[in-house]
């Protein structure tokens, strides 16, 4: 996975490659799809949601440019896989999921994989986690029509936010850096995420 899906496709950040090598992805996919855990794609995890493709998880990790000292917010816990990768890359990870059953499953998987210091919250992550802000970095694993304002406002100065921005059917992964003069944006790869449902995302109906 690391060689073919990541390094050969241009992921060069050694910390990210090492993190991807360390996290046992099979612990974050449903038992019946364990044999596909290291394949090049997203997989269903129930409740109409998916665990993201490894390349996309690595791309988000690389765009956040973490050095190991940060407090990071992960929006859209899903299986907990992205949160585990972020826990390898940063000091502290808070993750938030709107579907309680997925949050519970992620808590169990994270503990099994040895990442029990990741804090799993249940709620509308499009509003961030104000009581734990500011964050050095925020990863959003669900598509938003615009950069959610609450998330940008919970970044520290110089903080980095990665979010798939676009329609419900296709997005671009965008890096937003908080600067004294306002947000600085850079586009990255095309992607397709499930929608971010909530106040700062798409309407849930
Ligand atoms: N990072 C996950 C990917 C999960 S898919 C992984 O590695 O497995 C995106 C997740 O975002 C879904 O579980 C979905 O329920 C969740 N989600 C959607 N809108 C949300 C919101 N407003 N707040 C929190 N979670 C949300």
Image (cartoon, helix red, strand yellow):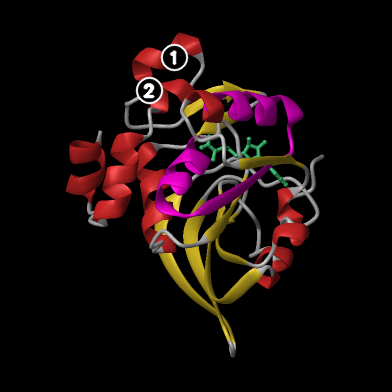
Q: Is 104 included in the stretch rendered in magenta?
A: yes
Query: Magenta segment, which residues?
Result: 81-109
Image quadrant assignment for residue 153: bottom right
* Residue lying at 50% horizontally and 23% vertically, measured from the top left: 112
Checking the image for residue 180, the label placed there is none
Image quadrant assignment for residue 62: bottom left
Residue under pointer 2: 37
* Left/right of residue 13 with respect to residue 29 in the rendered view: left
Residue 139 position (above or below residue 104) = below
Residue 11 in sight:
no
* Left/right of residue 134 with respect to residue 7 in the rendered view: right
Quadrant of the drawing holding the C terminus: top right
Q: Position of residue 60 (x, y in %)?
A: 43, 53
Residue 91 position (above or below residue 37) = below
Q: Position of residue 75 (x, y in %)?
A: 63, 48
Label 2 CA crowd tier, 10 Å (few <14, some 14–19, many 20+): many
Q: Is mark 2 within 8 Å of ligand 1?
A: no
Q: Is 132 included in the stretch rendered in magenta?
A: no
Q: Of helix, strand and loop, which one carries label 2?
A: loop
* Left/right of residue 52 with respect to residue 97 in the rendered view: left
Q: Of helix, strand and loop, which one carries label 1?
A: helix
């Amino acid at each position: 996975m690391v060689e073919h899906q990541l390094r050969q496709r241009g992921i060069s950040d050694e910390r990210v490659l090492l993190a991807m090598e360390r996290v046992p992805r099979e612990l974050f996919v449903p038992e019946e799809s364990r044999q596909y855990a290291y394949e090049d794609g997203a997989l269903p995890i129930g409740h109409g949601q998916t665990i993201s493709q490894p390349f996309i998880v690595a791309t988000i990790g690389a765009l956040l440019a973490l050095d190991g000292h940060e407090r990071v917010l992960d929006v859209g816990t899903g299986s907990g896989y992205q949160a585990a990768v972020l826990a390898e890359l940063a000091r502290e990870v808070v993750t938030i999921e709107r579907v309680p059953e997925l949050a519970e499953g992620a808590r169990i998987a994270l503990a099994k994989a040895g990442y029990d210091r990741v804090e799993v919250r249940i709620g509308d992550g499009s509003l961030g986690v104000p009581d734990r802000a500011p964050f050095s970095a925020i990863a959003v694993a669900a598509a938003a029509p615009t950069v959610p304002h609450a998330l940008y406002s919970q970044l520290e100065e110089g903080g980095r936010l990665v979010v798939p921005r676009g329609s419900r059917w296709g997005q671009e992964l965008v890096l937003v850096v908080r600067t004294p003069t306002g947000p600085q944006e850079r586009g990255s790869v095309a992607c397709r995420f499930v929608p971010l449902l909530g106040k700062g995302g798409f309407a849930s109906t």
